[in-house]
Amino acid sequence: MNRNEIFFALKNKPNISVLIVGGGINGIGTFRDLALNGVDVLLVEKSDFCSGASAASSHMAHGGIRYLENGEFRLVREAVQERNRLLQNAPHVVKPLPTAIPIFKRFSGLLNAPLKFFGILDKPSERGGLIIKLGLMIYDAYTGRQKTVPRHQFLSRKQSLAKWKQLNPDVVNTAVYYDGAILQPERLAIELILDAESENPNARALNYVSMVGGSEDTIILRDELTDETYDVQPRLVINAAGPWIDFTNRTLGLSTRFIGGTKGSHIIVKHDELRKIIGDHEFFFENEDGRIVLIYPFFDRILIGTSDIPIEHPEEAHCTDEEIDYFLSLTHRIFPSLSLTRENIVFQFSGVRPLPHSGAKTTAQISRDHSIEVLSGDWTNLHFPVYSLVGGKWTTFRAFSEQVTDKALAFLGLARQKDTRSLQIGGGRGYPSEPGEMRRQIESLSAWTGVSRERLKTLFDRYGTRAESIATYMNGGTDFIISTLPDFTLREIIFLVQHEKICHLDDFVLRRSMLGMLGRVTRVMIEELARILGNALGWNAEQKEAEVARTLSILAERHGVRL
């Protein structure tokens, strides 16, 4: 169904089993799981899918080795297993990520680690080689028989300095272990939605739709594009609004304090020398103040982060000058001969982790685990329960969604029909595991569609095996390379507009492509994209100009990109 058809169906049949409010990764994962199990489910998101907290990740599928100090062994075990599943189920988006930990002391932290575990010590303290070794041994043990990634290694000082020429000579060891890189998380999210809707015609997802009120048996929704309102009558509401959970509950007259979010910011820099030095390795380390930070290989750029600062209002999250100065300076601890300046920054972003409200003395001590908070009964003045999804992260979204779905199915009196543990996602289906198989697929598809092998290689890198559908569409009409976007063709973009729920120009620039995040945009490009998208979506000249202005404003105010 397209957008208008969904609204028409809701007007004629407002009764639904489950309404999910919030189109971040927790809401989307739950939407897919419910859809696969035959539930009529509606997901609404007030902005674009994965444009809030889920758009501000460190782009990692990781087990969270540092959570071991807080005693969160169950979470680490779950996260490692889910990391491995993502590598298997979405190999077109999630890739193995070798991660280096530079170590400057051997025995530091032997006493501090157990004190942190028991909650006695709350100040950051440097972890030495022995503590890191013990943590990585546990980490490897959790991978178990899955063997999706290699086991960790410890490199000597000599080996470390030989491998990374500019590395700080004060290192005593470097530990190397593997996590996963989620190269395009927003694309992973849209593919989850498309999978769900293709599996179940009664599963419908709408972006730019907000919940504006509700009482007794009715929820009022508003289309943010037209200002029209719609009434729906759900049996169950799932509040997956992330850091906005408490604000969303207030819309229903419910007073809660479930969220105690912290802000995490990042910058993306263009620095060819640093990018060459780190190669395919992420550097994950303690800065001099004890904060865990990262230098991450991100296509031909470098992602640097992250902060962990308490914040009350998610809308106020932005990357501050103080954070930027901190990020620019932290590379000096690992690569003292290199320098970064603001001229190297091509993009910046910030979001709020939907962590549980906590009395912890430091943000590092707040649990990264997830939970379901249930609101029901006469005191709510609602005829349906509300499940608030607290916490969660990209790595564990599938497991969290499974827990929420099991609870929802039990409430609805339904049995689980399908399991998602081994279910491949979108373009991960049939994705070739060997380079030779990839070449054969590309050659065969090139012969079938007439699209060049070079273009198909780009499509496979971008969309996995969905490249076949896109290439077939590209071959179905006049196509040409966009003058300001030599990596895209006209019909490739039109295909995305028609199939991926694009409503605004910034949806494409920031979430259906990597153009914005990698600093590839120009004003002329934005204007040309507005013409292409506008022609496909029926915008008039005034709307096209408004979309250009909107996108330029978002790039400047939220991401520090001024064109």
Image (cartoon, rainbow, N blue to C red):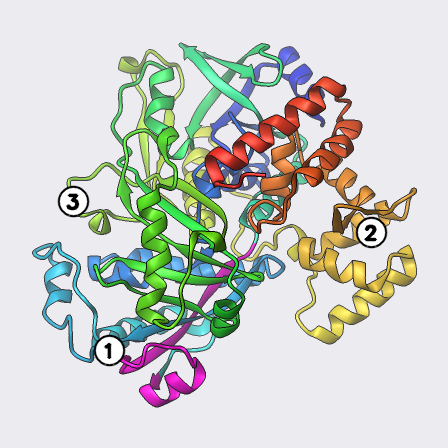
Instruction: Label 2, secondary structure: give it.
Output: helix
Question: Given this view, does label 3 or label 1 mark the residue nearer the observer?
Answer: 1
Q: What residue did someone put label 2 on?
A: 471
Instruction: Label 1, secondary structure: give it.
Output: helix
Residue 278 x/y as whole percent? 47, 72
Q: Is 554 situated above or below 269?
A: above
Q: Residue at x 62, y 29 (%)?
A: 204
The dot on residue 129 is 1
In the drawing, does residue 399 fall left or right of residue 511?
left
Residue 202 x/y as whole percent? 64, 29
Q: What is the spatial separation of the Cα atoms under label 3 and label 1, in whole angstroms?
A: 27 Å
How many other residues sit within 10 Å of disc 1, few (<14), some (14-19) or many (≥20)? many
Q: Residue at x 41, y 42 (%)?
A: 350
Q: Is 232 situated above or below 419?
A: above
Magenta stretch: give its range: 155-183
Three-letter amino acid code at disc 2? Ala
In the drawing, does residue 509 fall left or right of residue 131?
right
